[in-house]
Amino acid sequence: MGIVKTKSLARGYVWWPGLDEAIEAQCRECGVCAAASSAPPAHAPRLWSWPDRPWTRIHLDFLGPVRGKTCLIVVDAYSKWIEAIRMNGTSAAAVIRVLRELWSRFGIPKQVVSDNGPPYSSTEFKNFLSSNGVDQVLSAPYHPASNGAAESAVKICKAVIIKSFKENLDTETALCRFLLQYRNTEHTTTGESPAKLLQGRSLRTRLDCLRPDRGDHVRAAQERQRRAAGGVERELRAGDPVWVRQYRGDDKWMPGTVRDRRGDTDYIVDTDNGTGIHRHIDQLKSRRVTLNNGGGSVAKRNSLVFPGSDESVARSDVGEPIDGMSPPSSGGEHKRERSAEPVAVVSAASPTAHTAAPCTGGTPNKSPDPSASSGAQLVADSPVNAPSRVPRTRKPPFRFGFEDLFVISNNR
């Protein structure tokens, strides 16, 4: 009848000191009563310690078979990441093959927790773990709560599989879709998603299409910064003569020639002393040089122009594109007003270096008197259909310090 009812019955008939203690001792010593008694009250749960890093301790358990489908469930104790792998068998060799693939992706854990199933208690599985330096922890038989992390994951995945059967969906597709969302959702225990804790990032899902593209946002911000910075677009080519900014010595600028282009704005420039230096385009300026052409001199880029002079003036009178600009057309149409008449370049030995024969009102296409410009050479032919202009006399320009080299434009 049990201890309580036995004491109640005895007190109705007899009593002596120590009656209750004697009855309790007699009932506890009864083997038949102990064999047929119920389980004791449940023990207060003992929680597993939380690992200090991901994939340190993993929990294993089998799901199924559910309608002929069996899966191996693997749970990371740190991040709560769940892996559900379809299994064709439950042998130790099959489990080892799956674990080896997982460890090649996430690394080898320090501890593996499982129940006492045949695959886990086999000698083959124990040797596999010991050879990889992994400790094995076996839960108590017939006590699933000891491996609670794996049991909870099995319960969740089993519900997904049963729902897929009821909705006539592919089981593996439904399980993969669920696991993607589960891994990307904040866990109630850790306060972070399993993907954040294990991989350090959120996994991209179809819902991310609702969010604006971060790349477009960055490009728009960079474009705003470029417009706010201002500046002009310039470009140099290999072989262009330039002024190079130097930071040693008294002179700020030294002549050089572009050798190669290393980027949108970076160039390698050869200086006159044969040294190749790396400069940004902000440290380079176009310069002009004078090239000898037979009996005269053709001004390509005048090297005697001051480095601080206006570089927007055309660098070439022989039709060469300047700083990415198209050469003037044969009809004389250009954004800048160009001379439609012949242009004479006077060499340093010319006796008329300080004077120029003024236009006396003749035909605009008529060449100047050779006696008045000995040593001069025409570098551009007169256009066939030159616009008619009122003849006028214009004094030649006078350049201080450079009287021996200048360009005389006639009938302009």
Image: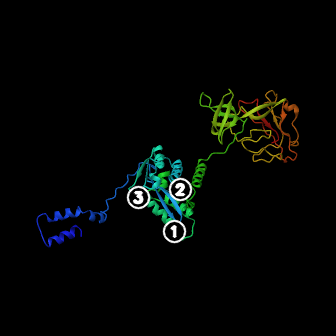
Left or right of 1: which side holds 263? Answer: right
Q: Is residue 145 left or right of 345 when viewed as pictured?
A: left
**Amino acid carrying mark 2 in the image:** Leu
Residue 74, relative to residue 129: is it above or below?
below
| Residue 364 to residue 6: above or below | above
Q: Judge depth for marks 1 and 2 and give the one in front.
A: 1
- Image vertical order of residue 189 relative to residue 412, above or below: below
Location of mark 1 (residue): 163
Residue bearing the label numbered 2? 203
State left or right for residue 2 relative to residue 94: left
Quarter of the image with the N terminus in it: bottom left
Q: How far across and how far down the image is residue 211, in percent?
A: 55, 60
State the image quarter where residue 298 is shown.
top right
Distance, label 2 to label 3, CA atoms, is 26 Å
Q: In front here: 250 or 199?
A: 199
**Quarter of the figure that contains the C terminus:** top right
Percent of width and height locating residue 92: 50, 52
**With respect to residue 217, does 264 lie above or below?**
above
Q: Residue at x 53, y 47 (%)?
A: 104
Q: Residues within 10 Å of mark 2 (few under 14, many from 20)?
A: some
Label 2 secondary element: loop
Q: Check disc 1 and give the amino acid type.
A: Lys
Q: Which residue is mark 3?
A: 148
Asked if one can make out residue 284 in the rendered structure from this viewpoint, the answer is yes
What amino acid does circle 3 point to?
Answer: Gly
